[in-house]
Image: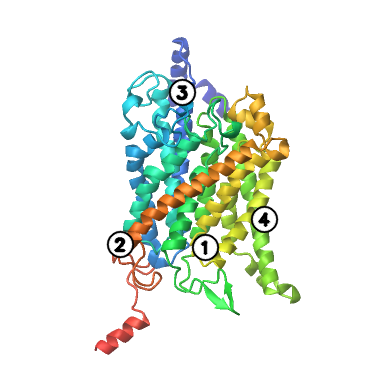
Amino acid sequence: EHLLLVLMRPPRTMRWMILALAFGRAAGESSFLSEEDADTFWLIFGMSNVFFMQTGFAMLEAGSVHQTKVRHVLLKNILDASIGALVWWSFGYGFAYGSDAFKETGKNGFIGGSGFFYENEWNRGEDAPPLTGTGFAKTHGKAMWQFQWAFAGVAATIVSGAVAGRCQTTSYICYVLLITGFIYPAIVHMAWSDDGKFSRFRSNRLVFGCGVMDFAGSGVVHLTGGVASVIINGIFLDARRGRFVRDRDSVVAGEFEGPEPSGAIFRILGVLILWFGWYAFNGVSTLVLTGQGGLAAHAIMNTTLTATSCCLTTAAVSALHDLVADKRFKKSFDVRDKDELYDTNYPGNGILAGLVAITAGCAVVSHWGAVAVGFSTAFVYYGSSRFIDYMKIDDVVDAFPVHGVCGIWGLLMPGLLATEYYYKLAVDPDDTARARRCRGVFYGGNGSALAAACLFILIIVAFTAGVIFVVFYVLDTRGLVKVDGDPEADQTDDDVSPRDQPVSNYRRRPNSQQLNSRAQAA
């Protein structure tokens, strides 16, 4: 009876909705979004979720450092977004997507040369992206700028966790300016601009006849940030106090005897937030929704399969390694001892490693291929993590193993596992010959896509490592890189506000050394 009453006498709000709908249809107007508005909303939705990943990075890094360094880490995350936005608007986007004559003449192909401050030719013509233009670009262009800025912020933030608590803010600001204004834009231009040397978004002058399949940025975003982190970390910064100890004349990796990290709660919260944002990171990389909904859904499903399979495999591999290393097979232990084998760090980083690895090929591999990527990436990540520990490189959040090494592995996966059907769907549904040529080697491809990926990897590593090394060498000669003194001592960093005290204990008591000094002075 109540339902009939509602239908016979709808509420006032519903009456107005019915009248508006009837009037709109009577006037011949469509009640649906236009294709331009739908595609623009798709990018805005993706940008919002990818930008929210900054929260995940902040939580992950805050949970991986000593409590006296939390504010220092959070400051760097704020600087990434704020400085990066202005630099991306000023120079970065122009270098990334500015004009280049490579498609017509074969010259350049490495960096754009126009559109700085989102001006110049982008303000004129039928295809002008700003609101002064007309057509599809009018509504889509600025959303594209926002989406690409969120990606640039991710590339910059990768390093902040790796160098947490040991890098001066001055040198970190220089790094943000460098990576968002020059290094990352140049790599974006090579891979994702129509005129880029390694771009797949055209039909002529393709590297090895295929171009690079880096759908959402295993190489462009993650490998770039990973290489920068290992150069800064491995060459210019010292390990935290007590990070590495010697036991029985061998380096014991991962046995950190210094101050404990802030807690697993923040780390796992950060991982889950990043996982959430990664669905937009990969799925919205279709850049348009119209006609690409199925491809986006396929990419998102593969993202889930790889993340979960890599998480479980990493957890099993790390636990098995601990069992063998500690020779625990030869003794009995209760359930509590078994639970201690499963640390949250490796499963959490396993999720991130799987996400990085599937980012390049999420749209072109099958579901079984996605599971294979996750399974294999677990061994790649775990081995590289233990190796950098053995080399005494103090990577606070495993940035290089997760983003650098797994970024390389991810770039190789399309060349091995891409299927003809999904490659054609993602690149050009009408170019069957190219899909057959560029599909994965395991599916009958001729290896051209794999060769293009290998060459692109070498370019990213050489370019990023070279520029970062030169700039930080100059900064280091002027004493602007390392934090003075013990980076994990009780006092705060010299370049951080003296208010940067432990989050859980703002007015903390003096330590024993300070008490002894006061006693001697008295």
Asked whether residue 41 appears in the rendered view, the answer is yes
Q: Nearer the viewer, mark 3 or mark 2?
A: 2
Disc 4 versus disc 3: distance between alpha carbons? 42 Å
- Residue beneath label 3, please? 36
Q: Is residue 111 above or below residue 515?
A: above
Q: Where on the picture, by quarter, is residue 99? A: top left
Report the amino acid beneath label 3: Glu
Q: Secondary structure at mark 2?
A: loop
Amino acid type, residue under disc 4 in the picture? Thr
Residue for badge 1: 264
Q: Residue 62: x and y, percent?
A: 44, 60
* Residue in the foreground of this view, choosing between 164 and 265: 164
With 421 as the anchor, is 88 left or right in this view?
A: left
Badge 2: residue crowd in 10 Å (few <14, some 14–19, many ≥20): few
Q: Which mark is residue 478?
A: 2
Q: Name the spot of residue 164 as percent of width and height, x first.
A: 42, 61
For discs 1 and 4, the disc positioned in front in the rendered view: 4
Comes first in the chain, label 2 or label 4: 4
Instruction: Indicate which disc, 3 or 2, sits on the residue closer to the N terminus.
Output: 3
Closer to the camera: disc 4 or disc 3?
Answer: 4
Is any atom of residue 277 visible in this view?
Answer: no
Q: Which residue is mark 4?
A: 313
Amino acid at dot 2: Arg
Classify 236 as above or below 146: below
